Image: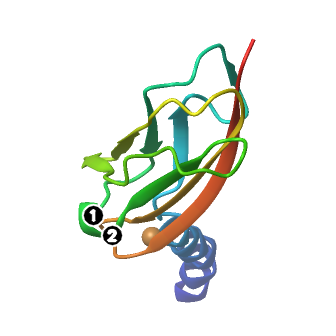
Amino acid sequence: MRRFLLIGLAPLLMLLTMAVANAHAMLERAEPRVGNKVAAPPREVTLWFTQKLEPAFSAITVTNSVGERVDSGKARVSGNQMSVSLRAGGSGTYHVNWHVLSVDTHTTEGNFTFQVGQ
Ligand SMILES: [Cu+2]
């Protein structure tokens, strides 16, 4: 009887371990949307994550099509959301790089692009 109980528990423990491993702050969505095209240069970029963020160790940088920084350098964090203001940087491909520290003390980072133009 006891043996059957242990065999039954093993998959459950594995599932729990996987749930913890996946609990980092991953990018849930972005505005402008990842890979999307917008007509005019956006005034800001906003990212939403799967977990709340620690403001002190979370940042976004945005560069325009010729590699110039167009972000203000001061990301604003509120809960699971992070935004940064942009100056107009012309049309073409914009690169967004982000790194965050989530409240579970794990760091994650990533990048994506969006297009500005007609
Ligand atoms: Cu984590």
Q: Which residue is mark 2?
A: 57
> Is residue 26 placed above or below 13 in the rendered structure?
above
Q: Position of residue 89 (x, y in %)?
A: 57, 34
Q: Position of residue 104 (x, y in %)?
A: 34, 71
Display coloring: rainbow
Q: Position of residue 55 (x, y in %)?
A: 26, 60
Q: Is residue 86 left or right of residue 39?
A: left
Q: Position of residue 62 (x, y in %)?
A: 55, 48
- Image point 50% across, 44% down: which residue? 70
Tell me the CA gap for discs 2 and 1: 6 Å
How packed mark 1 is, by other alpha carbons closer than 10 Å (few <14, some 14-19, many 20 or more), is some
Q: Is residue 55 left or right of residue 4?
A: left
- Image point 52% across, 68% down: which residue? 108
Q: Amino acid at mark 2?
A: Phe
Helix, strand or loop at mark 2? helix
Helix, strand or loop at mark 1? loop
Asked if the residue under mark 1 is in contact with the one under mark 2, i.e. CB atoms within 8 Å, the reply is yes
> Is residue 102 placed above or below 67 in the rendered structure?
below
Q: Amino acid at mark 1?
A: Glu
Q: Which residue is mark 1?
A: 54
Q: Is residue 54 left or right of residue 45?
A: left
